[in-house]
Amino acid sequence: MNPERIKASCIAYYNQMHEQYLEDYRDELSKKPYDKDFLLRFIENIPFKGSVLDIGCGAAAQQARFLLSSGLKVTSIDLSEKCIETAKKNFTGIDFLRMDMTEMDFADESFDGIIAFYSIIHVPDEKLGTLFRRLNKILRINGKIAISVHAGNFYGYHNAGEMAVFYRTYTPEELTGHLSGHGFKIVEINQRKPICDFEFQSERIYLIAEKIKGLPAVEHKKHQVNL
């Protein structure tokens, strides 16, 4: 599949859906005790007032806001300019940036933690090596990463109304393999069935991993984070 077409499909979809996503997911965590408990376990492993990157925050930035309310310093990125604009208009205290997760240009070891809730599902195979390498580079040693994805074996375009957006699912073995191969140790991995009527009806994988080693240097631009 063409990575540029995949990227364009995601931008177009979330640009169109940004207001609906804000309405649907603004208070999502109040309906998801499992997700809140998972985030709390992640937060327990982040230093007091530590810095966390939220990858694929969307217009509602619900996970980022939960992290902020727990006393963490949060930077949130999203590929959709409309999602970033909407999040900035509605929420304060978070550094919102429009950025492609596969082209992140943060300085090395900028963050104590990273979360990626249903965002790496939009990354094709051709970009995964680059993504996981960048995740390693921007996370401090012993830093934690929390990831949630849809479980399964789907890889292609989903027609959402008139929009076709690329997404993929993962098996536990695929997800742990990518992380283990890029300097991470798995701390926990669990799987659950959909628990809310408004959720996409798929099983989900929740994983926390720890960076245990760096990778050989690669050249990329640096974006200084204001902490």
Image (cartoon, rainbow, N blue to C red):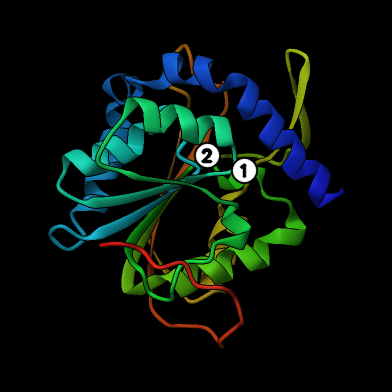
- Amino acid, disc 2: Tyr
Residue 112 image offset from top left, x and y in percent = 29, 65
227 left or right of 2? left
Between 74 and 196, the one nearer to me in the picture: 74
**Mark 1 closeness class: few <14, some 14–19, many ≥20 residues within 10 Å:** some
Q: Decide: is 114 above or below 39.
A: below
Q: Decide: is 190 above or below 181.
A: above
Q: CA distance from mark 1 to mark 2?
A: 6 Å
Whether residue 59 is visible here, answered yes or no, is: no
Mark 1 falls on what kind of element?
helix
Mark 2 falls on what kind of element?
loop
**Mark 2 closeness class: few <14, some 14–19, many ≥20 residues within 10 Å:** some
Residue 207 image offset from top left, x and y in percent = 42, 52
Residue 109 image offset from top left, x and y in percent = 38, 74
48 left or right of 66? left
88 left or right of 118? left
- Amino acid, disc 1: Ile
Between 199 and 161, the one nearer to me in the picture: 161
Task: Say which quarter of the image contains residue 212.
Answer: bottom left
Between 165 and 154, the one nearer to me in the picture: 165
Q: Which residue is the site of mark 2? A: 118
The residue under the point 25% across, 62% down is 227
Whether tag 1 and tag 2 are in contact, CB under 8 A, the answer is yes
Q: Which mark is residue 121?
A: 1
Q: Residue furthest bottom?
A: 216
Residue 114 image offset from top left, x and y in percent = 38, 56
